[in-house]
Amino acid sequence: MRPIRTISVFPTLLTLGNLICGFFAIVVAARIVKPIEPINLTQLAEDAEHLMTSGWLIFLAMVFDGLDGYVAGWLAPQATSGPSWIASATWSASASRQHF
């Protein structure tokens, strides 16, 4: 019977975490509205909260991206679909960083 390679799932899960964090950072940053002339402090506080959440998601995506490269190099899986996942996840995280 052929052994099951479960250890190569970890780099893919880390890349998926990177992709999810980058995507939701863009979604949360899109909720920030353009300020109107009379400053509404409630809206300003909500925008600051959205900005902080988006920043933390970007930071978490960077952590996932770094861990993904480290774990993938450590385990050296022979996956054929890895580069496409990594490219899309890195693009979404970098697009969310460039949004600001």
Image (cartoon, rainbow, N blue to C red):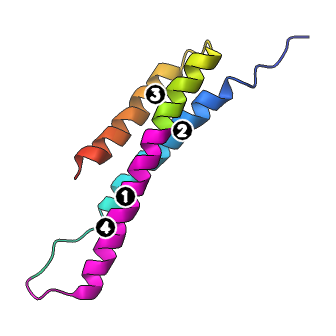
Q: Nearer the viewer, residue 60 or 84?
A: 60
Write the residue at 34% across / 35% down: 91
Write the residue at 76% across / 19% down: 5
Label 2 belongs to which residue?
16
Write the residue at 31% across / 60% down: 29
Label 3 belongs to which residue?
86
> Within 10 Å of the Cα at label 2, are there few (<14), some (14-19), or many (20+) other Cα atoms?
many
Label 4 belongs to which residue?
31
Point out which mark residue 54 bears: 1
In the visual, does 21 lie left or right of 9?
A: left
Query: Mark 1 and mark 3 in contact (Cβ < 8 Å)?
Result: no
Task: Name which of mark 3 and mark 2 comes first in the sequence.
Answer: 2
Query: Mark 2 and mark 1 in contact (Cβ < 8 Å)?
Result: no
Task: Name which of mark 3 and mark 1 comes first in the sequence.
Answer: 1
Asked if one can make out residue 37 in the rendered structure from this viewpoint, the answer is yes
The amino acid beneath tag 2 is Leu
* Range shown magenta: 37-63
Q: Secondary structure at mark 1?
A: helix
